[in-house]
Amino acid sequence: MKLLIVDDDGLIRDSLKILFETKEDWTAKTAENGLAALESCREQLPDIILMDIRMPVCDGVEATRKIKAEFPGVKIIMLTTFTDDGYISSAINAGAEGYLLKSTPADGIIERIRAVEKGAMVFDKGVKLTAGSAPEQKSAEFPELTQRENEILSLIATGLSNNEIAAKLFLSQGTVRNAVSIILEKLELRDRTQLAVYYWKNI
């Protein structure tokens, strides 16, 4: 797998490059800002980009938007320290397939990169609290769903599995599984990834 690591902190760039190339059969290039990342993509398109958000010259959200416009097939995971709803929503709207925190253990980052490679959308557990607040407001934004369905949708959007949602809401796994099927039918979507994208683009 070809990776591109984009971060204005040279230590983080180099550390991640060494980590990935040592632990996995991956190659990694680096870039210090969004514009440099775009130029790197034009030279050699990576499979997955790990993108910081706050960078000089061109930040991660704008870089994601530019790269996706030119290379829609490349997959981008935001890797940052910020858990704000605004950053998460902006990143997903720009086309990112994931949102991870830099505090994520190395093995966790590798696992989520593999998941994105297979077509999943990933979110760090550390962003759940900021994304899962105010269920009443979400019901107003998705009036075709019941309050419980809106609550389940918000948890799907933060990356929780059916088992995790069931435990969090004190429901059976079967109840959650049926609710997910109903939500997909009501919103005319195909899978959980589309649900997560729909949520973050409309919240």
Image (tube, rainbow, N blue to C red):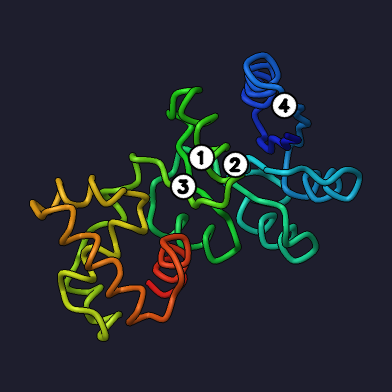
- Whole-Å distance between the Cαs marked 4 and 3? 20 Å
- Whole-Å distance between the Cαs marked 3 and 2? 15 Å
Q: Which residue is mark 2?
A: 52
Label 2 residue SS: loop
Looking at the image, is 188 positioned above or below residue 6? below
Identity, as a three-letter code, of the amino acid under mark 2: Asp
The answer to the question of whether label 1 and label 2 lie on touching residues, with beta carbons closer than 8 A, is yes
Identity, as a three-letter code, of the amino acid under mark 4: Trp
Going from the N terminus, do you reach mark 4 or mark 3 first? 4
Position of 51 compared to 187: left or right?
Answer: right
Label 1 residue SS: strand
Q: Which residue is mark 1?
A: 80
Q: Which residue is mark 3?
A: 122
Identity, as a three-letter code, of the amino acid under mark 3: Val
Looking at the image, is 98 positioned above or below residue 195? above
Residue 170: give x, y in percent of width and height: 8, 51
Position of 190 compared to 57: left or right?
Answer: left
Q: Which residue is mark 4?
A: 26
